[in-house]
Image (spheres, rainbow, N blue to C red):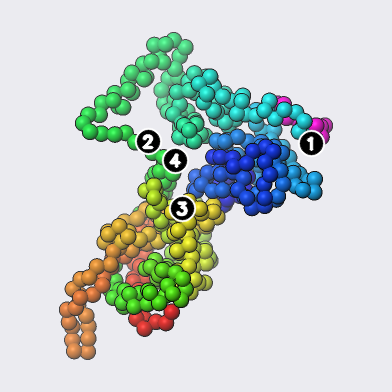
Amino acid sequence: MPKMGESIMEATILKWNKQVGDTVEIDETVLEIATDKVDSEVPSPVSGKVLEILHQENDVVGIGQVIAVIATGNGEEQPLPSPAVAETPSAEQPVNGRSKAERLEEPVHEAAPAVQSMSESGRFYSPLVRNIAKTENISMAELEQVKGSGLHGRVTKKDILAYVERREEKPAPGAQPAPVQQPATVSAPAAVSLSGNTEIVEMDRMRKLIADHMVNSKRTSAHVTSFVEADVTNLVNWRNRVKDEYQKRFGEKITFTPIFVEAVARAIRDFPMINVSVEGTKIIVKKDINIGMAAALPSGNLIVPVIKGADQLNLAGLTKVVNDLADRARANKLKPEEIQDGTFTLTNVGTFGNVMGTPIINQPQVAILATGAIRKKPAVVETEYGDLIAVRQMMFLSLSYDHRVVDGFLGGSFLRRVADYLEGFDANRQM
């Protein structure tokens, strides 16, 4: 199982694209996995034939564990088996004292968790789920009542742990039918008491993760939001003038997002203490400026791909990266490392016609900037002939920041500096 970021320690196998006996080319997708951040495809590091699959679909596997064995054309087997295989409940896969060839001669299906962990109803339970159930003394009949959020309704680690928490809050169901039925009778009205034209929709996996992340952020950080209004007339006029030629020259559509990212990166260089995270009582200052950009998915969920080293890219480079990440985000083609290590986040609420917002901080960062819709408004313009009223392109910027480490002076000064860079955009700038 490949490493997919500092904070990710395990992943769930969603689907095997290859089976035992199939040939595979280098970089060809072998399986699809899911973490608490993103779904991803795992490519093969070598060409060869799949000899063993050591973990089944919906198993939660730790980073670094062997999940499959591939025989290469030169007779070698990669990767070599590790003790991680013995962590499954299968006692029929000894390692010490037996050769690899001897173990391969044994029928693989005899030790496969999918066979041993299938209930009479046909529902699959991974070794991890079954171990938790055994530890918590949860019977198979009780386990069958646990609602699963995994693929095809399978019970995941989070499902079983959440059930255990709820179970501890009330007496465990007894052997007699009456106590088992009583909780169901009490809770049933919540599901059927709805009246009128209503529908109950279960959150999908990503929406549950987003919900947990947002609640955790509010619980962790002391949120404060500041606002400024910026005159971005020069910026808008420049983009309108060059967008067709820009696409011909660079093969990319230029949106406002890379221009916003450029301004944010410049402001972070001016105020580096906005580019930090908090660990206990320590402030971790990040030297890299990695700006995440919130992207809406067709499903309605949200994901935040990260522009690494944003301060090192010119506008053409930022445009290319922004467009590429946005396109692959919508196609669910992002790699796990492309949503990791962000140090600051930008969200464009103006995309939805909103003039401003109060975004929630993307932990463990300490600030997030929202850019509102650009609207034509009457504004006072200072000229050599005095103050005049003119129609200008105006936009609100809002910065939510963690008041534990970012006070009003720093947060307000940084936000004003971003606005200054946008207002000072050179309308005669060359591409």
Counting other residues with Cα less than 10 Å from the Cα at mark 3, is it few (<14), some (14-19), or many (20 or more)?
few
Say which of marks 4 and 3 sits in front: 3
Counting other residues with Cα less than 10 Å from the Cα at mark 2, is it few (<14), some (14-19), or many (20 or more)?
few
Question: At 44% across and 59% down in the image, what residue appears?
Answer: 326
- To which residue does mark 3 refer? 331
- To which residue does mark 1 refer? 100
Question: At 39% across and 11% down in the image, what residue appears?
Answer: 178
Say which of marks 2 and 3 sits in front: 3
Q: Secondary structure at mark 4?
A: helix
Res. 371 image quadrant:
bottom left
Please state which amino acid type lies under the numbered disc 2: Glu
Magenta region, mostly helix, strand or loop?
A: loop
Q: Secondary structure at mark 1?
A: helix
Disc with the residue nearer the chain's start (1 vs 2): 1
Disc with the residue nearer the chain's start (2 vs 3): 2
What segment carries the magenta color? 90-102
- To which residue does mark 4 refer? 205
Q: CA distance from mark 3 to mark 1?
A: 40 Å
Disc with the residue nearer the chain's start (4 vs 1): 1
Look at the image and tell me in which quarter the N terminus lies: top right
Please state which amino acid type lies under the numbered disc 4: Arg
Disc 4 and disc 1 in contact, CB within 8 angstroms: no
Disc 4 and disc 3 in contact, CB within 8 angstroms: no
In this view of the protein, can residue 276 be seen by the observer?
no
Say which of marks 3 and 1 sits in front: 3
How far from the left and from the top, in percent, is residue 383?
22, 86
How far from the left and from the top, in percent, is residue 243?
37, 74
Disc 4 and disc 2 in contact, CB within 8 angstroms: no
Q: CA distance from mark 2 to mark 3?
A: 23 Å
Please state which amino acid type lies under the numbered disc 3: Ala
Res. 101 image quadrant:
top right
Counting other residues with Cα less than 10 Å from the Cα at mark 4, is it few (<14), some (14-19), or many (20 or more)?
few
